[in-house]
Amino acid sequence: MKAQDTLLYLDGVSVSFDGFRAIYNLSLVLQSGEMRAIIGPNGAGKTTMMDIITGKTRPDTGDVYFNGEVDLTKHDEAEIALLGIGRKFQKPTVFESHTVEDNLVLALSGPRSAFSTLFHRQSKDEAERIREILDTIRLHDKRDWLAANLSHGQKQWLEIGMLLAQDPKLLLVDEPVAGMTDAETAETAKLLREIAKTRSVLVVEHDMHFVRELDVKVTCLHEGTVLAEGSLDFVSNDQRVIEVYLGR
Amino acid sequence: MITQWFFSHVDRRGGIVITLLVAIAVLVPLSNLLLPATSPFHVPTYLVSLIGKYLTYAMLAVALDLVWGFCGILSLGHGAFFALGGYAMGMYLMRQIGARGVYADPVLPDFMVFLNWKELPWFWYGFDSFWFAALMVLLVPGVLAFGFGWLAFRSRVTGVYLSIITQALTYALLLAFFRNDMGFGGNNGLTDFKDILGFNIQADITRSLLFATTALFLALAVFVTSFIVRSKLGKVLVGVRDAESRMRFLGYRVDRFKLFVWTVSAMMAGVAGALYVPQVGIINPSEFEPANSIEAVIWVAVGGRGTIIGPIIGAVLVNFGKTYFTAAFPEIWLFALGALFIVVTLFLPKGILGLYGTWKSKWTDRTARNRDAVLPPVAAVRSGHTPIPEPQAAE
Ligand SMILES: Nc1ncnc2c1ncn2[C@@H]1O[C@H](COP(=O)(O)OP(=O)(O)O)[C@@H](O)[C@H]1O
Ligand SMILES: [Mg+2]
């Protein structure tokens, strides 16, 4: 099977909503340890692709494999999360009535059954990991704040922190710098590059400055399928990519 | 040791309420039994039973708050679990009557003799034993809730659809229990109880003991709810309430968490119903009325959902109001209740306790403004919740 030795393998994936083809014959391969940027105009199907990988949407046809062997179309959201795929949503979704720290506590990898959470006591190790993540996402001084009171950019960071706490093999990051200041954007690029040293990352983003700073292979989606793939310079000089972006 | 363990699982407010409940469990019976009726501190027996009844309602409200306030499951059928617990207790009390019934049949309750039944139906077996009945008080609501929740939560029925089927559940049970051939006394239900565990059910001492038991069980319910809510599981529940699908993407099996808390809540409601029946002396199908379940929702909303203590206050206050209004102006009670619900929904989304929280946060805000003006302190925004200290890691 071709999926062997890949971390994420999508082949010939299609999905329609009431006759509207959101994803059409999409194929994409991600190697272990790789970071990939996905670009493409609004409505290209980038978020839908993440929905398919994380089990939220079932594809009509096509193969989706994780780690070369796990058929993701046969698992639900919780199982896929436990396999080691974490996701950051386009619209930041943190638990607003929990504190920053509790958001991380919930995300932290570990037993997830009702029984074990009922009698859970935080270990020294867990406390240490939370401290580390709070440092990484620079929210240490706000650990007792309700997530609802964070700024938009801070929520994005908290969500990235939650991803780290989950300790996934593959991170799916949907538009992480939307609504961020330039300084925050640069910081986020730095953070993602740091994260990508130890894990695989698939990041969707519009912001070309940001994609350039990531300095990774780029895949351009359009109308649910791959339009071009390669370095950012290669992709952005592709005639069809230019048409898609400028034609709008 | 034990007190330390105890207080690591309840907040200050929960501790106060539990202490208060234990105190009234002791003081009210003492006053009723020992003080002369002329003393201003004497609590007359009718009042002991009336407050006892309110406390069972409060327990139902706490159970409802556990699923609605903390997990976002709005049950419009919790009265069904309450009534089932009540029926289990009622069946025990019926069988205690023995040959003292009107027809003096040593085994069959009066209504069965009246219906010309020759022998006890199988599902009445065992109810002559108190402990068997007590087990059924937990098991019957628990198993029904588990089966119902298993089907509903796995197929991801949520929101208003779930509320509607809970309402349908209690309505279906209402119709079923009305039927004479169901074997639960039909329209008249179960009544004319004589004694419980050998005590005359009308005696002052029994009434006082029932009151004390109710107060203690309510205290236990507060503790269990606090324990659940303050554990990591409680944080998961709140996560499910606020962003259910996000919780799934974190790897939590949301349906199982809902099933757990739903079943615990149903059993708590069953215990409340079992304590209610001996104090009011009757259980009949009207306890399954959908309107009862909706009233329970109003108690929780009035007191403040998601606060544990609020629902107790809401249940007691609304029922005092009900007792007063239905005696003084019976025709306007339902309008008053409806108006109360509208006022609370529009102006007090967090209930009475939320009002207190906002008032307190305004106060702390004003005093803290000069020191730290960036954001309101967490404790205030939590509408009165104190930040939860992490349990110590050391064993
Ligand atoms: N659940 C759904 N039902 C119907 N249409 C959908 C659904 N999800 C996505 N779509 C449609 O699919 C297209 C792709 O959407 P999306 O994946 O969100 O694009 P992108 O993230 O690239 O901006 C859009 O036209 C969107 O309206
Ligand atoms: Mg999108």
Image (spheres, rainbow, N blue to C red):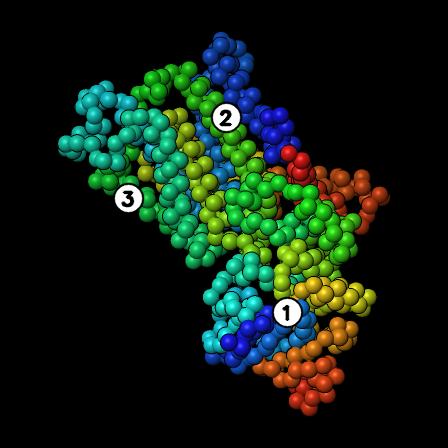
Mark 3 → mark 2, Cα distance in angstroms: 33 Å
Is A238 located above or below residue A22 in the figure? below
Q: Residue at x 75, y 84 (%)?
A: A233
Kind of residue sitting beneath label 3:
Ala
Instruction: Report the residue at 43% width, 22% height from top.
Output: B210
Q: How would you rate the neighbour count of disc 1 (Cα within 10 Å): few for under 14, some for 14-19, many for 20 or more?
A: some
Give the position of the N terminus of chain B as an image quadrant: top right
Q: Where is residue A158 in the image (x, y as percent from the top left)?
A: 70, 57
- The answer to whether residue A155 shows anywhere in this view is no
In the picture, measured across the screen, residue B121 lies left or right of residue A27, that is left
At label 2, which amino acid type do we have? Leu
Q: Which residue is drawn at 20% across and 28% down?
A: B108
Q: Nearer the viewer, residue B191 or B169?
A: B169
Q: Is label 3 in a helix, a strand or a loop?
A: helix
Q: Mark 2 points at which residue?
A: B216
Return the residue at label 1: A32
Chain letter for mark 1? A
A112 left or right, relative to B102 = right
* Residue B152 position in % (x across, y down): 42, 53
Camera-near label (3 vs 2) is: 2
Disc 1, SS: loop
